[in-house]
Image (tube, rainbow, N blue to C red):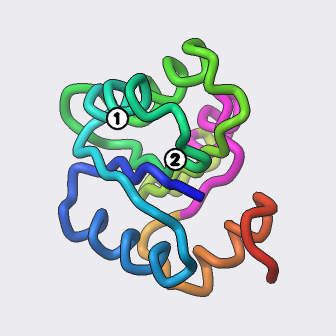
Amino acid sequence: MRALIVDDSRFIRSYLRGLLEKRGIECLEAADGQAALDQLHTNATVDLALIDWNMPVMDGLSMLKQLRADGFADMKVMMVTTEAENTFIERALDAGADEYLMKPFDGDALREKLAMLGLEAE
């Protein structure tokens, strides 16, 4: 399985990569939504995208909408963000997110979300 981690924070990308690689998941990284979309159009074998909301160039919600419009309907998408208000969660889910993980989080919280997506046994 391959995941794309999209976050403008190098620390968060590294942290997520470490958690995912422990589970045998190969990881790609991008620092903004546009860079992530560019990667997806050349590496279409990504199974899971973990997307931050607040990023320069292209934010996570815009990226999610474009991702779905570009035909990546089967890719699982988890928003991983500090935005905790219900309106943000609803907007993400309406745009096609499959799950929503709020920062800060730990390995157990990520594992639970992966299990909810059918990507790891609880």
**Location of residue 120 in the rendering, given as x and y in whole percent from the top left corner:** 74, 73
Whether 42 is drawn above or below 111: the answer is above
Q: Does the CB distance between marks 1 and 2 fall below 8 Å?
A: yes
Residue appearing at x 23%, y 45% in the figure: 31
Mark 1 Cα shell of 10 Å, populated few (<14), some (14-19), many (≥20): many
Residue appearing at x 34%, y 35% in the figure: 36
Whether 2 is drawn above or below 59: the answer is below
**Location of residue 33 in the rendering, given as x and y in whole percent from the top left corner:** 33, 32
Q: On the rendered structure, is 48 left or right of 119? A: left
Q: Secondary structure at mark 1?
A: helix
**Mark 1 residue type:** Ala
Task: Tell me, yes or no, whether the highlighted magenta stretch contains residue 95.
Answer: yes
Image quarter of residue 118: bottom right
Residue appearing at x 68%, y 67% in the figure: 114
Q: Which part of the image, by quadrant, shows the C terminus?
A: bottom right
Q: Which part of the image, by quadrant, shows the N terminus?
A: bottom right
Q: How many marks?
A: 2
Mark 2 Cα shell of 10 Å, populated few (<14), some (14-19), many (≥20): many
Which residue is disc 1 drawn over? 36
- The part of the chain drawn in magenta is 88-101
Whether 103 is drawn above or below 99: the answer is below
How far apart are the alpha carbons under marks 1 and 2? 9 Å
- Of 82 and 10, the residue lying toward us: 10
**Location of residue 87 in the rendering, given as x and y in whole percent from the top left corner:** 61, 39
Q: On the rendered structure, is 57 left or right of 15? A: left
Residue appearing at x 71%, y 45% in the figure: 98
Which residue is disc 2 drawn over? 49
**Mark 2 residue type:** Ala
Q: Secondary structure at mark 2?
A: strand
Give the residue furthest to the top.
69
Q: Which mark is residue 52?
A: none
